Image (cartoon, helix red, strand yellow):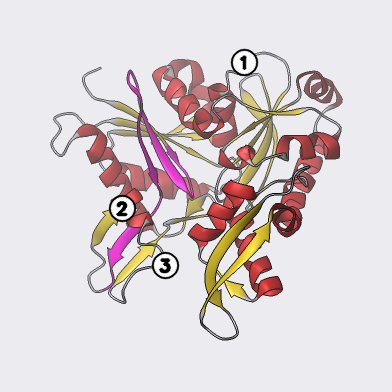
Amino acid sequence: MISKQIAIDLGTANTVVWEVGKGIVLNEPTVVAVSVEDNRVLAVGGEAKTMLGRTPGNIAALRPLREGVIADYEVTEAMLRYFVQKVCGKIWLFKPEVMICTPAGVTQVERRAVLDATLSAGARNAYLIDEPLAAAIGAKIPIAQASGNMVLDMGGGASEAAVISLGGVVVHKSVRVAGNRIDEAIASYLRRKHNIVIGEQTSEEIKIKIGSALPLVKEESLEVKGRDSLLGLPKIITISSNEVTEAIKPVLNMIVNMLKEVLEETAPELSSDIIDKGIVMTGGTSLLRGFDKMLTKELGVSCHVAEDPLFCVVKGTGIALENIELYKRSVTRK
């Protein structure tokens, strides 16, 4: 192959790019800073993320994907072009082949938007693969066998569960609830209980440092800085890990209910396979402390986090692109 083959996990929070033959070549936040006057892209990725909540009136820092789907087409296209150019260089003789993963529950219109944006960004061929399927391939699950495997992929904008057998998705459900909604739940809890307003980066930091799905045996605490919602002045408070657990519980319950719905719709034969193998968790939100134990307790089925959960989807997308003939039944092409 003279032209490059690129797999992209276009996530709500982060975008990871995998180049066939090299592995992961890029991992950047899905954030774009644009000029308000002429809609010109000023910064993409990590540089743009540092601007979130800190921009002057003439600059807007945006997340072009919301809840797993494209919310701003033009900005997404500009961002994809930036990522493709960063991997392939500014000048190339042969356009790259690009495969992108999308949630299994997206509409045909949303799929077409991703394909069109990919082709406009400079791809020769654009392919789409369902995210749960890519996550299963990346987690080294033998999806081609006549046996049921269940995957739960939780990113920044959406959580998706799917039962996979014979190389295809049998049952799937998704809720547009994941890492970002957990951050929002922490922020609204602090505003309600402590009259303090915090930004999304601070709430994400709280989740990572002291967040837990189950109450911790040894309680942890963290100092939080923000703005007093009543006086409008800067304020510092200390929050405990058990408070964070209480704040995020309603969001986690929505994911649990979605999993129960998938299991209810699963055929008995596939259900027995899932009981034997358990549920594989992938995506950044699966790293939340105690989440696997909480799901095991709620569902009565063992849940375990995949190896390298953050990169399962992009690895699987890369493997599918490399072996396109094997996976052509599972892939949409344009």
Nearer to us in this view, 205 or 56: 205
Local crowd at mark 2 within 10 Å, few (<14), some, or many (≥20)? some
Mark in the foreground, 1 or 3 = 3
**Where residue 192 sits in the image (x, y, percent)?**
69, 73
Task: Report crowding for label 3: few under 14, some 14 to 19, many 20 or more residues within 10 A (C-alpha).
Answer: few
Q: Nearer the viewer, mark 1 or mark 2?
A: 2
Q: Could you tell me which residue is drawn at 62 percent across and 19 percent down? A: 143
Q: Sequence-wise, which precedes: disc 2 or disc 3?
A: 2
Residue drawn at (56%, 86%) of the image: 231
Q: Marks 2 and 1: in contact by CB < 8 Å?
A: no
Assign the C terminus to one quadrant of the image: top left
Residue located beneath label 1 in the image: 144
Q: What label sits on residue 53 in the rendered view?
A: 3
Q: What is the quadrant of residue 161 in the picture?
A: top right
Q: Position of residue 330 (x, y in %)?
A: 54, 27
Q: Is residue 290 left or right of residue 283?
A: right
Any mark on residue 47, and which?
Answer: 2
Q: Which residues are magenta?
A: 9-36
Q: Does 164 appear in magenta?
A: no
Dots 2 and 3: beta carbons under 8 Å?
A: no
Cα gap from disc 1 to disc 2, whole angstroms:
41 Å
What residue type is disc 3 on?
Gly
Q: Quadrant of residue 1?
A: top left
Q: Which mark is residue 85?
A: none
Q: Secondary structure at mark 2?
A: helix
